[in-house]
Image (cartoon, grey):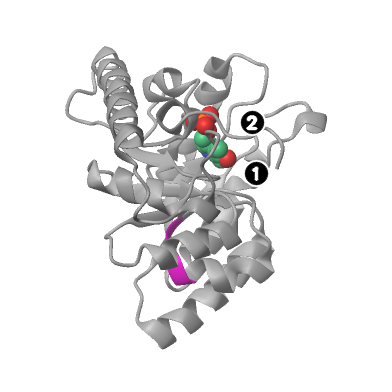
Amino acid sequence: MPSGESPEHDSPEQDFTGRESQLRIRLAAVRTRVESAAAAAGRHDDLPQLIVVTKFHPAAVVRLLAGLGISDVGENRDQEAADKSSQLQDLELRWHFIGQLQSKKAKSVVKYAHALHSVDRPQLVTGVARALAAEQDRSGRGPLACFIQVNLDDDAGSHRGGAAPAEVLKLADQLASAEGLILAGVMAVAPLGAEPHAAFEKLAAISSRLSAEHPGATGISAGMSQDLETAISFGATHLRIGSDILGSRPVVR
Ligand SMILES: *Cc1c(COP(=O)(O)O)cnc(C)c1O
């Protein structure tokens, strides 16, 4: 987070003019990268959905993004996402939950999330389905799109979350038969310190096996600031971009 800017200083009176023009420029640069990568992959008419990852950035910044035409934002911690989404209820934003999720947080996440990108185990499917059913009774909210997060790391020590590739189809069957949950596809984070090429190639193969069984589940949530071009070349349908639009985050959390 840039210095001098924290959620505590998140007042509408604050002068965000400089911040807005910076965001506009960075956003345009990312859009240009996305368009050229899509063109290079023969996907001119098939641009991926841009999700701006706003973790650690205050609600006022999310509001600026909405003013710049952003409709989809990503968050990885429930408390932070719940706070920001409730402050921004007047905007028509879709909130994507992209972080590891404890089952006990499902009740909160289903209140604001349009999509969940980090389904990685059977107990979470059960917990989310139960929480969603209760929330649908309460508020009448719509279904929840779910991506199965796949672990693409062969080295168990540097695990970045996700189900093992061999578990994906079973998890998909469970998800597809759960009331209110829509099986959207797969999600992954490229392993740290390795070329993303092999990882996204593997993800594309897993995705095609999945969509052979579940024809609607064609989503591929992949691609971050550093590797969006590679992700697009391997069929990413949803990009999760944070730092190249918002600037760097604090390293320590
Ligand atoms: C933070 C985060 C991103 C965004 O990463 P950047 O490198 O800042 O673009 C994408 N996906 C997940 C799961 C994240 O936690």
State the residue in front, 83 or 138.
Answer: 83
Q: Residue at x 43, y 87 (%)?
A: 138
The quarter of the picture where the C terminus appears is: top right
Q: Residue at x 59, y 14 (%)?
A: 195
The amino acid marked with disc number 1 is Gly
**Percent of width and height locating residue 122:** 66, 61
- The magenta stretch spans which residues? 111-115
Rate crowding at label 2 as few (under 14), some (14 to 19) or many (20 or more) other CA atoms within 10 Å: many
Kindly identify which residue carries mark 2.
152
Residue 208 lies in what quarter of the image?
top left
Q: Taking 69 as reference, is 145 above or below it? A: below
Q: Taking 92 as reference, is 131 above or below it? A: below
| Residue 221 falls left or right of residue 202 | left
The quarter of the picture where the N terminus appears is: top right
Does the CB distance between marks 1 and 2 fall below 8 Å?
yes
Could you tell me how far apart the alpha carbons at marks 1 and 2 are, in whole angstroms?
8 Å
**Percent of width and height locating residue 118:** 57, 50
Q: Taking 77 as reference, is 32 above or below it? A: above
Kindly identify which residue carries mark 1.
162
Q: Is residue 63 magenta?
A: no
Q: Residue at the left extreme?
A: 45
Q: Residue at x 24, y 41 (%)?
A: 68
Residue 105 lies in what quarter of the image?
bottom right
Pick whichever of labels 1 and 2 is earlier in the sequence. 2
Residue 142 lies in what quarter of the image?
bottom left
Marks counted in the figure total 2
**Percent of width and height locating residue 77:** 60, 54
Rate crowding at label 1 as few (under 14), some (14 to 19) or many (20 or more) other CA atoms within 10 Å: many
| Residue 4 falls left or right of residue 91 | right
- State whether residue 203 appears in this view: no
**Percent of width and height locating residue 30:** 33, 24
